[in-house]
Structures are given as structure tokens and as C-alpha cells.
């Protein structure tokens, strides 16, 4: 009888150990990029710019969360944004789409060499703990 109770206790302990919380880590890489040029087309849901460093215009999607600011960081009304204005578009890649997160409307054009895109990688680690009850 004692042997049966001991065996049952060991089996239950092993079952609880197998059901212990598991930890999974997920690493997500998000590319934040920027591109400078002149607006060739603009609408509330899209912006197309032409830069001297790219042979073809580049198309970006815009969302409700896309912000429009001037050189100083002050908000700019979307009514001011139009074709012909020099801008810098900060965007993220979502699959094949480039989604504008911030558009900086420059007051004056510069004659400096075109700015190459800047890539900032941000890594996020998510820890998930699961328990079986």
C-alpha cells in the first residue's frame, strides 16, 4: 500500500513539473527609415516624393497616425502640405508597403547632397509566461 501511494505521489509530482510555466521569447525587428525629396503627389492616405537620388518617385502610405510637422517640430496642417514642397518622410516598412509615420515639411530647399536613408533597428523582446491549471 505504501509503495502504491509513493508511486502515485511521484507520478503527480512529475506531471506538475511537466506542466510548469514555459517561457517563450520573440524578437521583432522594426526598420525606421527616412527619405528626403519633393512632394510630387499628395492625398490624405498617400504621399509620393521625388528625390534627386532616386530615378523614380517613391510612394508612401499615410494613416490617421501620420504626423505632419515643420523643421522646428511644430504641427503643420494637412492643408499646407502640397506638391512642390520639400519634405523628409520618416516611415516603416510593413511587408512591401512603406507607411509614413512622420512627414517633416522643410521651409526651404537646400542645395546639399541628397541624404541617404537612415536605418534604425529597434529590437523588442516579449516574454510570455503560460501556466497550465
Image (tube, rainbow, N blue to C red):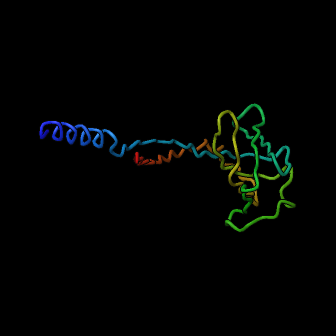
Task: Name the residue located 29 percent from the left edge and 39 percent from the top edge.
Answer: 15
Does residue 39 appear left or right of residue 117 in this picture?
right
Return the residue found at the far left: 2
Count of numbered tags: 0
Camera-nearest residue between 49 and 113: 49
User: Is residue 118 shown above or below 56?
Assistant: below
Residue 50 appears at what percent x and percent y?
A: 77, 40
Task: Name the residue located 70 percent from the left edge and 37 percent from the top edge.
Answer: 97
Q: Quadrant of residue 3?
A: top left
User: Is residue 84 shown above or below 53?
Assistant: below
User: Is residue 79 shown above or below 111?
Assistant: below
Task: Name the residue located 76 percent from the left edge and 44 percent from the top edge.
Answer: 61
Return the residue found at the far top: 55
Residue 90 appears at what percent x and percent y?
A: 66, 50
Return the residue found at the far front: 1
Q: Quadrant of residue 55?
A: top right
- The image quadrant where one finds the N terminus is top left
Residue 76 appears at what percent x and percent y?
A: 78, 64
Residue 18 appears at what percent x and percent y?
A: 31, 38
Amino acid at each position: 500500500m505504501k509503495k502504491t501511494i509513493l508511486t502515485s505521489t511521484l507520478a503527480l509530482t512529475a506531471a506538475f513539473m511537466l506542466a510548469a510555466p514555459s517561457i517563450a521569447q520573440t524578437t521583432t525587428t522594426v526598420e525606421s527609415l527616412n527619405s528626403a525629396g519633393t512632394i510630387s503627389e499628395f492625398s490624405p492616405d498617400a504621399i509620393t516624393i521625388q528625390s534627386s537620388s532616386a530615378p523614380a518617385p517613391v510612394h508612401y502610405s499615410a494613416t490617421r497616425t501620420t504626423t505632419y510637422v515643420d523643421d522646428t517640430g511644430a504641427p503643420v496642417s494637412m492643408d499646407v502640405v502640397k506638391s512642390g514642397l520639400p519634405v523628409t518622410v520618416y516611415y516603416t516598412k510593413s511587408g512591401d508597403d512603406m507607411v509614413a509615420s512622420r512627414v517633416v515639411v522643410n521651409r526651404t530647399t537646400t542645395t546639399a547632397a541628397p541624404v541617404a536613408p537612415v536605418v534604425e533597428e529597434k529590437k523588442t523582446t516579449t516574454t510570455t509566461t503560460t501556466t497550465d491549471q
